[in-house]
Image (cartoon, rainbow, N blue to C red):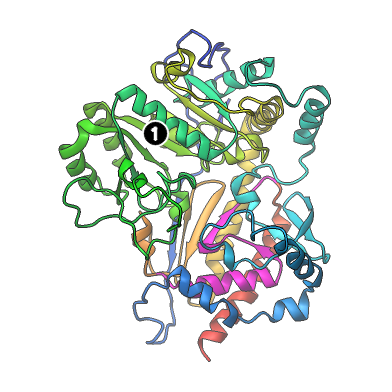
Amino acid sequence: MDGDLAEQSVIPDRMPLEHSCVSPEAGRLSGPMMPIVSSCLRATHLDSSRNQKRSPVGLQVLLKRRDQFDAKGDTELRSMNKSNELNEQALQHMPGQHSNLPGYELFKPIFIVRGDKAHLWDVDGNEYVDYMAGLGGGILGYGNQEFLEAVRKQLDTLYYLDAARRNPLEIELADKLSHYLPSAERVRYLLSGTEAVQLAIRLARAYTKRRYFIRFDGHYHGWLDNVLGGVVNENAVGPPFALDSDKDPFKSLGRDPLAAEQSFKLPWNDISVLENVLEEYGEEVALILMEPINCNGGSCPPRPGYLERVRELCNRYGIVLGFDEIITGFRVGLSGAQGLLKVTPDLTTLGKGVAGGIPFSVVAGKTEIMDMLRERRVIGAGTFNGYPLGVAAALATIRILEKDSGAFYKRMDKIQNRLMSGLKEVAKRYGTPMLMQGPRGVFFYQFIDKEVAYNVRDWADADHQKQERFRQLLFDDGILILFRGRWYVSGGHTEEDVDKTLEIADRAMHELVSESNK
């Protein structure tokens, strides 16, 4: 096989309750994958005011300025009366949106009633081309018939089960994960990415008998106290714990004030900072946790040699290396970012697209770490762990992705290349500098004159107000993307969707430039 698929093999007993062991290097081949793409389009005609370095516009400022944005698209082109009415009713019973992470307040409330491929329809009959994909969970697109048939079959057969009972499909899924994912000697199934990360932290602490873990600026690992928010302490004297700060967009009341002292928070992609911290505290660190490609912080790629050096440092100090592949797992390929970048962690967390949008997550890792669950030295419980519907959905997703030597990924590459190239051309046409980068399945843009951003600090001076205005203009014309410039590509997108998107993006850019020249 070519593409992202490894040589076929049958390797049984991949879960912590079983006893056999397999080398993470055995039976896997890395095929060609879409490279991490970065591009900056330099302005050809910029007036002096637009050519000056811009100051960062914080999220709070964006929220205050939201009402200043022109909403004529809503009133003249798209009615939102029913959505607005439903939102008023919802607020009588529920405290806002289902997720209230910073930035969600920027989205106008729309109530969706139907999805097909990459399209959504709201209660007012408005149609949208969706590049949010359920925040990355919808890798296949809406209404994939092969996926739906597998889910319906499981619903008719057995869709829940207590966690002490087993179902044959979970072994088949474990075989598939072990076959494709380099770190997956053993796997444990859970329900959400947040849970998976917490289990990985617990396993690493138990394995090393150490307390601290290291996390990085711009990386997201869930909303629980010990991984959410805090800012890097640039002048730390002693352990580099994250600081509580009003400048922290993830600042939340109710957090345990001691939660920040479970981890060190460092800038990512700066190996010298990490080396210095480990020289001082390496014997106290249980886990280094990161997104191998920082999709949450701008789809930033690792610097050449960075991950390899982190792997060496973990080996030297006896630290568990953990990759959060909640986004990249299955999106960049069945072998994940670790297969693409050829660096194997000790633990991996998977979620979002792993089950095609059905709630499901996975912790995968080395036998000697994962078997602490089998031996019951580490507790990893959950009512829905390994529930048959989620297992069937994950198995169906893999079968679709691996079919015809990875034809799904080849098609996604074609769609994404067409979209990214078109957006670059639109920006160039209007003399607007645009940073655009990302691996297969997810990419990021910001209005800044840079070739590549290696961490969130590299794009901190982007024109965030302009980026948010562009997003609003796209929304007004029926294109859904995430705030801060993230786009997800799914199996539902077509070339016609891309052409429509680029036509709308051209109109939005024209309006954006016209407004800035007033």
Up/down of 295 relative to 510, above or below:
above
Question: Which residue extends farthest bottom?
Answer: 518
Report which residue position mark 1 lands on. Answer: 322
Q: Is residue 285 left or right of residue 116?
A: left
Q: Quadrant of residue 78?
A: bottom right
Quadrant of the frame with the N terminus:
top right
Q: Outermost residue toward the top?
A: 19
Provide the secondary structure element on which disc 1 rests. Answer: strand
The magenta span reads: 462-491
The reply to whether the magenta stretch includes residue 489 is yes
Residue at 64 percent across and 69 percent down: it is 474
Where residue 168 sits: x, y (%)? Answer: 68, 14
**How far across and how far down the image is residue 229, in percent?**
40, 53
Residue 486 located within the stretch drawn in magenta: yes
Q: Residues within 10 Å of mark 1 (few under 14, many from 20)?
A: many
State which quadrant residue 382 falls in.
Answer: top right
Left or right of 8: which side holds 78?
Answer: right
Q: Residue at x 68, y 38 (%)?
A: 358
What residue type is disc 1 on? Gly
Residue at point 37% right, 38% down?
289
Residue 339 in view in this figure: no
* Residue placed most toward the observer, 488 or 90: 90
Instruction: Work out whether residue 433 can be spotted.
Output: yes
The residue that appears at 53% across and 16% down in the rendered structure is: 15
Q: Is residue 418 left or right of residue 237?
A: right
Q: At which x and y percent is residue 51?
A: 37, 81
Which image quarter: residue 87? bottom right
Q: Pinpoint residue 498: horizontal percent, then vertical percent.
A: 67, 59
Q: How many marks?
A: 1
